[in-house]
Amino acid sequence: MTTQTMDRPSQTVGGVEKVLEIEDLKTHFFTRDGVVRAVDGVSYHVLKGETLGVVGESGCGKSVTALSVLRLIAKPGRIVQGKVKMSGRNLLDLSDEEMRSIRGNDVSMIFQEPMTSLNPVLTLGRQISETIMLHQGLSKKDAWDKSVEMLKLVRIPEAERRVHEYPFQMSGGMRQRVMIAMALSCNPKVLLADEPTTALDVTIQAQILHLMLELKEKTGTAIVLITHDLGVVAETCQRVVVMYAGKKVEEATADELFERPLHPYTVGLMKSIPRLDRAATAEHPGRLMEIPGMVPSLKNMPPGCAFAPRCSFATERCRREVPDFEMKAGGHYAACFNSDKVAEIYHG
Amino acid sequence: MYAYLIRRILATIPVMAVVAVFVFSLLFLSPGDPAAIIAGDLATADDIARIRERLGLNEPFLVQFGKWTLNLMQGDLGVSIFSNLPVSKLMLQRLEPTLMLTTTTLIIAICAAVPMGVIAAWKAGTIIDRGVMLFAVLGFSFPSFVLGYLLIYTFSIKLEVLPVQGYTPIARGFGPFLNNIILPSLTLGMVQAALIARMTRTSVLEVLAEDYIRTAHSKGLATNKVLIGHALKNAAVPIVTIIGISFALLIGGAIITESVFAIPGLGRLTVDAILRRDYPIIQGVILVFSGAYVLVNLAVDIIYTFLDPRIRY
């Protein structure tokens, strides 16, 4: 079944193995009003043990991409094209049963809403040990002990007692810790973290991020950190993928991206972060910049570059042609005709 | 948790008190003089007056109510006007068939309806879902006496596999008991099953859209584990509620079903008592049925605490 994909061994980048590779993924939603191209030809890979940031506004397809990896797209959505490769296998070719053995085991996921992502009527222990029993074949008792261990790992105080409690007895931050414990309980190769800190208080956000990074070091699990917050990316990620309207618009190492953004959308995202070090002066009123306009409707996209209607660099060509996603500098990719100008102005 | 239980149990007392007042008032509110009914058509005014005196009907309402309540507390529900036998004894004789009929009905209805509802929710929008919904609409709209005769016609008269009517006590063997009880239970269970299936579908469908269901899938759980272990337990509170409420339907339905299948239960006793205006029996039956209803709903509230820990604490 996996013959086409088996012949090519899992590739490496600079000697580091790619643990997950998404190729030209298209996930569309066939609604009554038309086809919504939520993910329209996205490719990215995740290296062993790295943290990859996937950034974009709400509705840019970053979460749908992650859910597509786990094949958890609900109707009317469907993965219409592409590959999701892991250890030489295309996950999209697997049977439902084989796919279930991947979920929570090789790839696991944590979600934006810790308040609603745990089952309210089951104890924490039951919810964590369920995964462990399923994938590691441990007995109920051993799985329960492992659950306590996992809760200790994510620093839940009094784990032996807490394991018997229910989600409603915990705060949002603690619930997200439990989600992390659950997601990491089977030592996955990849953890898809979909806005894991968005719903939390700022102080708790930092704690959760640090916890995730620390556990990543311990377990070697690669993290795909999906977020709209470039501040979080700057702190945690080695590489960044920027998405807009279902497509990838820029990809670079985190250092490179923050130093020299090449896509006007990335620049817009950076300028919309409030910064204390840029105090208001006479010539710089210090106003927070916003990106004008709205994300285009994914049902009828403009013919050229999807960002053109909101872009101050846009030319006739941008409105007519879709720019290729191409390498602009060593390891730095962008989909923009005017990336030279963008770089110039951002630095100048 | 214990505080909740005690509060809930205490709350049944005022409910039962209101029921008792209502049941007792029945005698005063209903047309016709009980004394005249007991005395019969040929009695003189003197006869009636004597009977009134003997029954204590001339005393003030509150005094009568007080005496009646005191007797009630001692399990004395009065004496049947028609047969002169204690109401409690008459009811006890008829209890088993009704109890058995309602129990088997509930078991059949729940066992059929809950899986149907869960599958319908899981396959929402498909032909399976439509089929279950069609069954639910039919179950609601089909009068139970029509269904009863239809089942008798099919299984007893045409196929000759089950008896037409009657009741066999469970003490005389489970097989014969089941033979007799199955058609009445199906008849009575139809509305129940329709109601429970609908509620299960709605409730599970709502839960399936929750974030924690996505979490459960993302852990790699098989569909049946997600449906039963994660979805159904969350969806259970409204389902158990509707089962409790539908118990009232069950009691009403038992009266008709027992008549159709000639089962000597409380339902038959009630119908006969109403036809003869045997008020003490009517009062007793209403009290027992109301009490059963209150108890079932108390049980439902206690079951909640096992289903949803948020109620427990």
Image: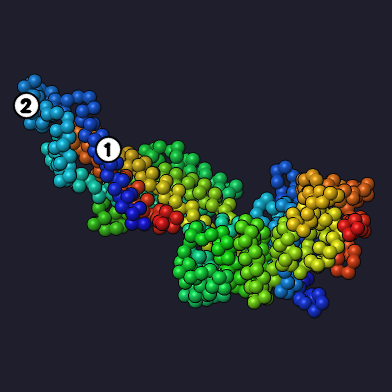
Residue A343: percent from left, percent from top: 89, 59
Secondary structure at numbered mark 1: helix
Q: Which residue is mark 1?
A: B18
Quadrant in the picture for the C terminus of chain A: bottom right
Mark on residue A99? Answer: none
Residue B20: percent from left, percent from top: 24, 38
Q: Taking the image as drawn, is residue A19 in sight?
A: no
Residue at 81% x, 75% y is A13
Task: Farthest residue to the front: give it.
Answer: A282
Q: Chain of mark 1?
A: B
Q: Chain of mark 2?
A: B
- First in sequence: mark 1 or mark 2? 1
Mark on residue B50? Answer: 2
The answer to whether residue B184 is left or right of residue B81 is right
Give the colouring mode of the picture.
rainbow
Residue at 72% x, 67% y is A236
Identified by mark 1, the residue type is: Val
Q: Taking the image as drawn, is residue A173 in sight?
A: yes
Question: Which of the 4 image quarters holds residue A262?
Answer: bottom right
